[in-house]
Image (cartoon, rainbow, N blue to C red):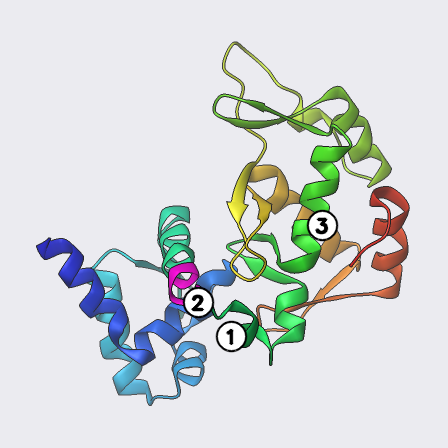
Amino acid sequence: MNSLASLATLIADPSRAAMLSHLLSGELASAGELARAAGVGAATASAHLRKLLDAGWLVCEPRGRHRYYRLADAEVAQALQALQLVADRGRAEQAWAGQPALRYARRCYGHLAGRLGVCLASQCLERGWLQAEEPGLLLTEQGLRGLQSLDMDPAPWRPRGLRPRAAAHPCLDWSERRDHLAGPWPRALLQHALAQGWLQARTGERALGLSPLGAARLSAVFGPLP
């Protein structure tokens, strides 16, 4: 129970909670960006970051003369989202009422979340693109053909060996209370959609915009979008 109490103390501070929430996108962020997200000064931000690093919730990646921070791994991201789901239980609509863009499409530790992410996950399952196998979801032959309709190379995602690597796994969506997709293929899909200009991101923001090109292309493959 002592470890649970320490965890509660760590994330109870509003500034640290804001930093962790900012990093849920899966992107790297500088100390200055995290200070602005938390609304604190540089010295205060540095103290908070040190505590999060010491606790193993963040890692720091030097890039030249600069230092950037990210969540330590997917387990940390999943833990934060699970806590937020409990915190918003019974008041989800109220909690998201003023954030329509973030609720519609956002980055969730490198994959697509929100109403759009839930829609694409549902369509992938309904169309038989994915099947449940240990240790997660594998792309079927139909799914591999579907990747070609999205101009993605299916070769890296063909199951190999007796225990093929999972392409995806369900992830309970923070705002929609339904599953979107997480894992290696959903991360590759999001990067592909951003590179193609189907989705648009703003620096330092989790919300994603669906471009007219993206709406046309994704709806042609998956059907009507939300």
Classify 50 as above or below 38: above
- Name the quadrant containing residue 186: top right
Q: What type is the residue that disc 1 sits on?
A: Ala
Q: Are marks 2 and 3 in contact (CB under 8 Å)?
A: no
Count of numbered marks: 3
| Label 2–label 1 contact, CB within 8 A | yes
Q: Main secondary structure of the magenta part?
A: helix
Magenta stretch encompasses residue 86: yes
Residue drawn 54% across the image and 54% down it: 177
For disc 1, the marked residue is 95
- Front: mark 2 or 3: 2
> Viewed as shown, does residue 5 lie left or right of 27?
left
Q: Which residue is mark 2?
A: 88
- Amino acid bearing label 2: Asp
Q: Which residue is mark 3?
A: 119
191 or 176, which lies in front?
A: 176
x 79%, y 60%: residue: 197
Q: Is residue 204 visible?
A: no
Callout 3: 10 Å neighbours few (<14), some, many (20+)? some
Q: Residue 142: give x, y in percent of width and height.
A: 78, 24
Q: Secondary structure at mark 2?
A: loop
The local crowd at label 1, few if under 14, some if 14 to 19, many if 20 or more residues have their Cα within 10 Å, is: few
Instruction: Determine the CA span between mark 2 and mark 1.
Output: 7 Å
- Could you say where residue 13 lies in the image, as x and y percent from the top left? 26, 77
> For the magenta stretch, what is the residue range?
84-89
